[in-house]
Image (cartoon, grey):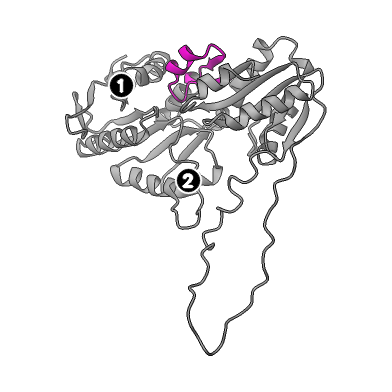
Amino acid sequence: MNVAKSGYRVFSANSSVACTELAKKITERLGVELGKSVVFQESNRETRVDVKESVRGQTIFIIQTIPRDVNTAIMELLVMAYALKTSCAKNIIGVIPYFPYSKQCKMRKRGSIVSKLLASMLAKAGITHIITMDLHQKEIQGFFSFPVDNLRASPFLIQFIQEEIPDYRNAIIVAKSPSAAKRAQSYAERLRLGLAVIHGEAQCSESDMADGRHSPPCVRNTTGHTGLELPLMMAKEKPPITVVGDVGGRIAIIVDDIIDDVGDFVAAAEILKERGAYKIYIMATHGLLSADAPRLIEESAIDEVVVTNTVPHEVQKLQCPKIKTVDVSMILAEAIRRIHNGESMAYLFRNITTDD
């Protein structure tokens, strides 16, 4: 299908071949050709984009997956969006399945809310709409000055559980921390399974970092008023690790949105194994799998890690055969089609709740 028939173009902003696989799957489902452009790094590591065809007056979709080199991927997206803007594209819609810096969405001591900064940069570059999937915190949508469609991967992961895990009726859904309990409960209710929660693991990750007013007052030599004596806040103490729920003789399925540093998941798998679980699966939307994640998974009690293809992880799969992939190009392609045709997106959110 050419541009005259489709009325829109789809480009990939990635400079690496491995990262364009998702874009190719989406365009095949849509029946359109991938837009002609060149994205590359010059010898001084600057990003250069060259759009090879006219985009004047057209609606453009830019597909950008985020590899390990996050900052380069962001610059590729920004430079391409600005190149399309200055080439008089009518609308520029970013398809960013995994939104980077989504973990930095809260003020932490003297840090910054980087995801809000990135949202402002995208708007300045010319992007007018974003399609993403499973934001780490749904409140991130409020950082944008333009529409954001936050799709869900849970229907695909639930389908995988039903079709690919033998005897899944004997499974139990596990939250690796109380903060993940709502997501796990949603999976458990849809699959009609039980729920277990691991308490006491990784509870200090954000406990003392969520409030930006942590700084103590300056010490000054004063002879007058000594100031107010505020009540001393008692320090949190990490409780001993416990599993709330019976996992003995069951298949344990841990669900989360991101699996990056797998230390928490490996520790959770060991605890579940000690409590009698005979098989352990990890289900997550975004498989970042940084550093030594493949090796740690291979050496752990985890039987299988199931992630979607929102983030390229072919190298990690070669290092660890336990990693499996679920394709979500179908829902991304349908979102593009509906947005271009001005159709409602409600169909893609059927029976979806805020906890999914």
Q: Is residue 350 visible?
A: no
Quadrant assignment, res 55? top left
Q: Nearer the viewer, residue 144 or 196?
A: 196
Helix, strand or loop at mark 1: loop
Q: Nearer the viewer, residue 120 or 91?
A: 120
Type of residue at label 1?
Answer: Ser
Checking the image for residue 93, the label placed there is none
Residue 298 picture location, percent across and down: 57, 16
Upstream in the sequence, badge 2 or badge 1? 1
Does the magenta run of residues contain 312? Answer: yes
Does the magenta run of residues contain 55? Answer: no
Q: Nearer the viewer, residue 113 or 323?
A: 323
Question: Which residue position holds label 1?
Answer: 16
Helix, strand or loop at mark 2: loop
Residue shown at 76% from the left, 24% from the top = 274
Q: Residues within 10 Å of mark 2 (few under 14, many from 20)?
A: some
Q: Nearer the viewer, residue 176 or 147?
A: 176
- Give the Cα separation between the discs numbered 2 and 1: 26 Å
Residue range highlighted in magenta: 306-329
Residue 71 picture location, percent across and down: 34, 36
Residue 191 picture location, percent across and down: 73, 23
Q: Quadrant of the C terminus?
A: top right
Residue shown at 17% from the left, 33% from the top = 44
Q: Residues within 10 Å of mark 1 (few under 14, many from 20)?
A: few
Position of residue 121 relative to residue 244, above or below, is: below
Residue shown at 64% from the left, 15% from the top = 303
Checking the image for residue 104, the label placed there is 2
Quadrant assignment, res 226? bottom right
